[in-house]
Amino acid sequence: NLVQSSGVKVPSRGVYHFYRSEEDDRAARDVLSAQELAPGRFVCFHLGANWEPKRWPPAHFASLAEKLFVEYGFTAVLTGAPDDKPLAVQVMKQSKAARVISLMGQTRLGVLGSLFRLSAFVVSGDSGPMHIAAGSGARVAALFGPTDPAQTGPRGEGDSFVIHKVPEGFSCPWYGKNLPQGGWLSLIQPDEVMTALKRKGWLTQTAAQQPGAGR
């Protein structure tokens, strides 16, 4: 809107791009090699957000990791800032059968974008790294609660979908202090995310192998 008000013609729906260097891409592939991970055979879970109501519960991430590993063989890679490490600990403790790897605080932003791009897809709440993933061309499953995806949803060049839940008696956007009973993003169940991933075709063998090929 600011650009448009200055007289510059803008598209009806802008698409943003996150720029990475070749060094970032090499560093991301080195990280994967160290963990014995093949491009396209892992998923990224970004656990953090600047506000608790925008964070999907660790137990839900753990449940989704179990389903993705048991049914499709995907390893879950946890990303986030150093302050998010307690969230990673919770996910890893509750993931019994799944292979879960934490890279919390171990990747600079450019490498993070490359890592997202090499993944099968990214699952994240409304966060800055969610936008990095979308701008890097990754597939993004964006989970929204108190914030409005029409305003801050993924607009990057990668494919994406949004699951948005608003509890009864609440409205969006919401910036209050008294959370709904049981939290907010807890309303989005792991099975619901799995169903959406299947609907997008991201869980077929062809789709699972494709993201890292030629990237």
Image (cartoon, helix red, strand yellow):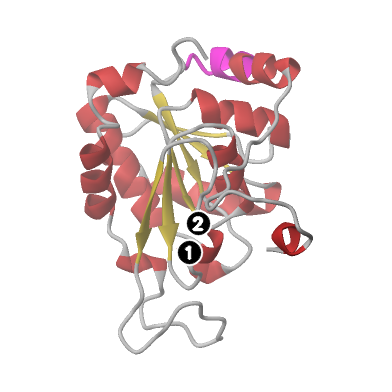
Q: Residues within 10 Å of mark 2 (few under 14, many from 20)?
A: many
Give me the disc on residue 11: none
130 versus 159 height, above or below: below
Residue at 44% x, 11% y is 213
Residue at 55% x, 60% y is 152
Dominant secondary structure (helix, strand or loop) of the stretch shown in magenta: helix
Q: Please state the horizontal and vertical placement of residue 120, each as a whole percent of the image.
A: 40, 28
Q: Please state the horizontal and vertical placement of residue 3, each as a whole percent of the image.
A: 74, 57
| CB atoms of marks 2 and 1 within 8 Å | yes
Residue at 30% x, 48% y is 63
Please state which of residues 5 and 130 is positioned toward the viewer in this rendering. Answer: 5
Q: Please state the horizontal and vertical placement of residue 18, each as a whole percent of the image.
A: 66, 36
Label total for image: 2
Q: Is residue 57 visible?
A: no
Q: Residues within 10 Å of mark 1 (few under 14, many from 20)?
A: few
Give the SS element for disc 2. loop
Q: Please state the horizontal and vertical placement of residue 40, each as a whole percent of the image.
A: 41, 20
Q: Which residue is mark 2?
A: 153
67 versus 149 height, above or below: above
71 versus 142 height, above or below: above
Give me the disc on residue 150: 1
Q: How far apart are the alpha carbons under marks 2 and 1?
A: 6 Å
Q: Quadrant of residue 2?
A: bottom right
Q: Amino acid at mark 1?
A: Ala
- Look at the image and give the residue range highlighted in magenta: 30-37
